[in-house]
Amino acid sequence: MNEGERYITAKEVGARVGLSPATILRYYREGRIPGRRLPGSVRPIRFLWSEVEAVWDCDRQLSLGDVA
């Protein structure tokens, strides 16, 4: 984690990589990208861009059947 880095939503990750928030959340559930379920009653999933970027491989992600 970079100093001062904030958590971002699936929508924000999707906007950066050209995929829908639903696809980003599916990638998280499948273990393809890292994320965190935050505490609270709703327990939203949030991402650190530096962690997602470190594992992101667009060619590999799209080869698994996803459309940009």
Image: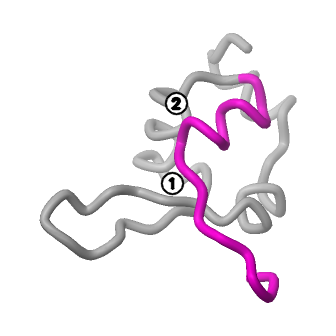
The residue indicated by pointer 1 is 31
Residue drawn 40% across and 57% down? 45
Task: Let me know if residue 39 is in the magenta part.
Answer: no
The residue indicated by pointer 2 is 21
Residue drawn 57% across and 22% down? 20
Residue drawn 65% across and 70% down? 6
Q: Position of residue 22 (x, y in %)?
A: 45, 27
Residue stretch in magenta:
1-18
Q: Nearer the viewer, mark 1 or mark 2?
A: 2
Q: Which mark is residue 9?
A: none
Q: Position of residue 60 (x, y in %)?
A: 79, 34
| Occupied quadrant, residue 50 | bottom right
Left/right of residue 1 with respect to residue 40 in the rendered view: right
Q: Amino acid at mark 1?
A: Gly
Left/right of residue 37 with respect to residue 52 in the rendered view: left
Disc on the earlier residue, 1 or 2:
2
- Kindly give the residue lying farthest to the bottom in the view shown: 3
Residue drawn 27% across and 75% down? 39
With respect to residue 26, does 51 lie above or below?
below
Q: Position of residue 49 (x, y in %)?
A: 74, 60
**Within 10 angstroms of label 2, few (less than 14), some, or many (20 or more) residues?**
some
Cα–Cα gap, marks 1 and 2 = 15 Å
SS under mark 2: helix
Task: Let me know if residue 11 is in the magenta part.
Answer: yes
**Within 10 angstroms of label 1, few (less than 14), some, or many (20 or more) residues?**
few
Q: Nearer the viewer, residue 2 or 35?
A: 2
Quadrant of the rendering where the N terminus is positioned: bottom right
